[in-house]
Image: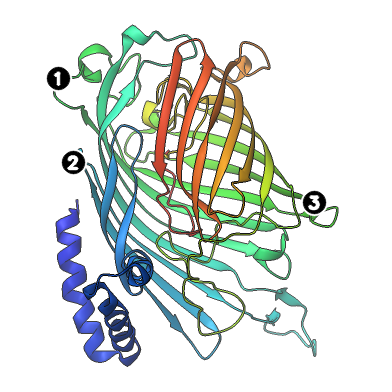
Amino acid sequence: MIRPTFLFILILAVVPAFAQNESRLHSDFRREGEALKVCTHFSVSNLKGCGQTLVMGQPMHIAVGSFSPQNGFGAGLAFVEHKNFASEWRDTWDIDALASNNGSWRAGAYMKAYRLPGGAIHMSFPGSHASAPAPLFTNAPLFNFYSQFISLNHIDYYGLGPNTQRTAHATFGFSENITGVSAILPLGRALAKGRPSLDFELNGRFPSVRPGPSGEPSADLIYTEADTSGLINQTGFLQPSEGLRLEPALFKDHLRLNYYGSFQQFIAPANSAYSFRRWNVDFNHTVPLYNVLPLRSSSYNGPDDCTDPGGTLPAVPCPPVSATQKLEGSITLRAFLSESMAGSGSRVPFYFMPTIGGSDINGTRAIASYPDYRFRGPDLILFQGSIEHSLGKLPAGLLFSADGGKIALRRDDISLDHFRHSFAAGFTIHAGGLPLIAFVYAWGGSEGSHSIATISPTLLGGSSRPSLF
């Protein structure tokens, strides 16, 4: 696998080569170098500009973010660049590598291709005599190409199902390469206008399980392949998926919906005993408390990119971070359901099962008062509600949330009873209008309380990274 140091060397070796042959890129490096000159003279007035260039500058900046729970905080470098074509197509490249304080690391390359502003795209077929063929799309699809390597040294495991005991605690290490392509096909004028879209994905997934950190009970010494499918043997997967997203804004933008349903197929060509299918439905409802719509991540940006794609070319750089924000707040309600299906003689590998408790492997909080990864199983139902409000006009906010849900080993056990529940309160620090840092204290479950501190692994609303399960 590619180590972060190798990717650093690759970036440093490739970038000068590009700079010698591409005047636009050379110009970008020159402007960033000039912006960094303020860092050589310390003053209060220079501090803001220096910091923003270091962590948001293009084409190179410092990359930071939380890894999966129990794997610490990561820091490294990111390279972000754009290319605009005369046809109004734009390509973006995003390469990063980070290492954490516990030895975990992640390295990835992400490319996007899309057309903005773009009028209708027409397609005619041989033999067609139509003088004006109907438009195929009123906005071009968004294509994503990516390859991400991640190595996590510490993941907690308590067995499978909703009734596991804390005394069954063990750990394991997990690595995965995800290489794939996805496409978002808008069925309206633009993705940003809330129109429905079709989502397609084709991934190659290559997982690997190893013993956890020394001094901790190792999962492979406590559990077996019989009770934890995939613990001893791992294989590669071909994982296509299809999805439909609806994002209407109703009642003059006083209610914003984000509904998403997907069907995933995990195909293990080398060992069909691990093949399975999964469907997910995710219903998000956001109610703005003021006439300020909550900002969202941009599907057009890579995870290290905060460029405003807008509708004009060239791209607008990252907006300056301001200490003064508009008064804002919102209420969010979410319902999520995930169910897995394995054929006769097949089982779902445990590392591809969702979890509740603390945060999951993607860093998403669910039933946060319980330890991270506390309950694991192939089927999940989850309800979440939260309210967040800014602290005056400061770039910070207060957060309160309530969760309820359960993990199940069989689809028939997914019901609205025997829920685990949790409450959480905390505060967030915003940059560019989006929560970047969160501190949360959770309580209310049967296993005590849990404090969580996270730094967003995406920059100011960049798109999310591929899910690890």
Of marks 3 and 1, which one's residue comes earlier in the chain? 1
Residue 239 is tagged as none
Count of numbered marks: 3
In the rendered structure, which amino acid carries the disc numbered 3?
His
Quarter of the image where one finds residue 71: top left
The front one of 136 and 284 is 284
The front one of 306 and 187 is 306
Could you give the CA–CA distance between mark 2 and mark 3, rounded to whole angstroms?
Answer: 45 Å
x and y, in percent, of residue 152 in the image: 26, 38
Q: Which residue is mark 3?
A: 254
Q: Residues within 10 Å of mark 3 (few under 14, many from 20)?
A: some
As helix, strand or loop, the secondary structure at mark 1 comes to loop
The front one of 462 and 184 is 462
Residue at 37% over, 71% down: 45
Q: Which residue is mark 2?
A: 103
Residue 215 is tagged as 1
Q: Where, quadrant-wise, is the C terminus in this rendering?
A: top left
In the rendered structure, which amino acid carries the disc numbered 2?
Gly
Residue at 48% over, 59% down: 460
As helix, strand or loop, the secondary structure at mark 2 comes to loop
Q: Is 261 on the left or on the right of 397, as rendered?
A: right
Of marks 2 and 1, which one's residue comes earlier in the chain? 2
